[in-house]
Amino acid sequence: MTAILVMLAVVAAVLAAAFGYVGWRDRRRLSSDDDPDVVRAARAESHRRAAEREHVQHDGWNNAGHGFGG
């Protein structure tokens, strides 16, 4: 019976340590000072790529096999 309690206590301690580490890591990651210019450039690049994908799907080229359709 004692061995089971010790095993459960060890498992609980390992889980608590894992959750504590992940929470600490995420807080540290969120609190780091990100360069606003880098963040802005990455966001702009993401929007630009999304706009390009949208344009490629709707630009009318080769619509029904007839070349550029406007």
Image (cartoon, rainbow, N blue to C red):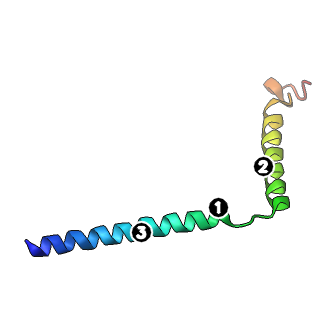
The structure residue drawn at horizontal position 10% and vertical position 74%, both measured from the top left corner, is 2
Indicate the position of residue 69 as horizontal and vertical percent values.
Answer: 90, 24
Image location (x, y in percent) of residue 28:
61, 67
Q: Which mark is residue 30?
A: 1
The location of residue 37, given as percent across then percent down, is 85, 60
Q: Quadrant of residue 52?
A: top right
The three-letter amino acid code for the residue at tag 2 is Ser
Residue at x 55% of width, y 68% of height: 25
Q: Residues within 10 Å of mark 3 (few under 14, many from 20)?
A: few
Q: Secondary structure at mark 2?
A: helix
Question: In this rendering, would 15 be left or right of 22?
Answer: left
Residues packed near mark 2 inside 10 Å, few (<14), some (14 to 19) or many (20 plus) = few
The residue type indicated by label 3 comes to Ala
Q: Residues within 10 Å of mark 1 (few under 14, many from 20)?
A: few
- Residue 15 versus residue 40 in the image, above or below: below
- Residue at (26%, 74%) from the top-left corner? 10
**Is label 1 in a helix, a strand or a loop?**
helix
Gap between marks 1 and 2 measured at Cα: 20 Å
For mark 3, what is the residue?
18
Q: How many numbered marks are there?
A: 3
Local secondary structure at mark 3 = helix
CA gap, disc 2 to disc 3?
A: 33 Å
The correct choice, above or below, for 50 with respect to 22 in the image is above
Q: Say which residue label 2 marks.
A: 46
